[in-house]
């Protein structure tokens, strides 16, 4: 019974990691970071917060492997996924800063 539960958890985690990687791939593609252009190598750093990414090695490795599969070997070498503590707070601060810049542009 325990083996079945472990296998089920691994299957669910693999699906979640692949879906997360697909979302990251979509953002990289939208930003134009899904291809290497003219030998240019821009490093993309993706900061994630959460216990699943931090503590569940299989999830983290599956996400990285899926990104490598989607981006290709050459591009995936320039994409780094790191754990970020207090990601919610940092994200809120970045959103507030970008919104305030938008308001300044709108007013002028």
Image (spheres, rainbow, N blue to C red):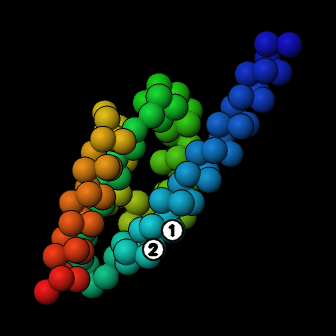
Q: Residue at x 37, y 74 (%)?
A: 31
Q: Quadrant of residue 42?
A: bottom left
Q: Quadrant of the N terminus?
A: top right
- Front one among 96 and 19: 96
The mark found on residue 52 in the picture is none
For label 1, the SS is: helix
Q: Quadrant of the C terminus?
A: bottom left
In the picture provided, is 81 more to the left or to the right than 23?
left
Spot occupied by residue 63 in the image (x, y as percentages of width and height): 53, 47
Q: Residue furthest right?
A: 1
Whether residue 69 is visible: no
Q: Residue at x 45, y 34 (%)?
A: 50
Q: Residue at x 63, y 44 (%)?
A: 16
For label 2, the SS is: helix
Residue that mark 2 sits on: 29
Q: Quadrant of residue 89?
A: top left
Spot occupied by residue 77 in the image (x, y as percentages of width and height): 35, 58
Task: Determine the CA span between mark 1 and mark 2.
Answer: 5 Å
Label 1: few (<14), some (14–19) or many (≥20) C-alpha neighbours in 10 Å: some
Label 2: few (<14), some (14–19) or many (≥20) C-alpha neighbours in 10 Å: few
In the picture provided, is 51 more to the left or to the right than 19?
left
- Front one among 58 and 24: 24
Q: Quadrant of residue 12?
A: top right
Spot occupied by residue 34 in the image (x, y as percentages of width and height): 42, 72
Residue that mark 1 sits on: 26
Q: Is residue 38 above or below residue 65?
A: below
Q: Residue at x 25, y 70 (%)?
A: 41
Figure label count: 2
Q: Kindly check if marks 1 and 2 are in contact, taking CB atoms under 8 A apart as contact.
A: yes
Whether residue 79 is visible: yes
Q: Residue furthest front?
A: 107
Spot occupied by residue 67 in the image (x, y as percentages of width and height): 50, 57
């Amino acid at each position: 019974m325990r083996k079945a539960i472990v296998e089920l958890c691994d299957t669910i985690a693999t699906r979640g990691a692949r879906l997360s990687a697909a979302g990251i791939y979509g953002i990289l593609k939208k930003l134009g970071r899904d291809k290497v252009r003219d030998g240019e190598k821009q490093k993309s750093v993706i900061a994630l917060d959460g216990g699943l990414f931090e503590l569940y090695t299989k999830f983290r490795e599956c996400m990285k492997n899926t990104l490598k599969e989607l981006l290709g070997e050459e591009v995936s070498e320039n994409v780094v996924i790191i754990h970020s503590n207090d990601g919610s707070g940092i994200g809120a601060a970045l959103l507030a800063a970008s919104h305030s810049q938008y308001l300044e542009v709108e007013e002028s």
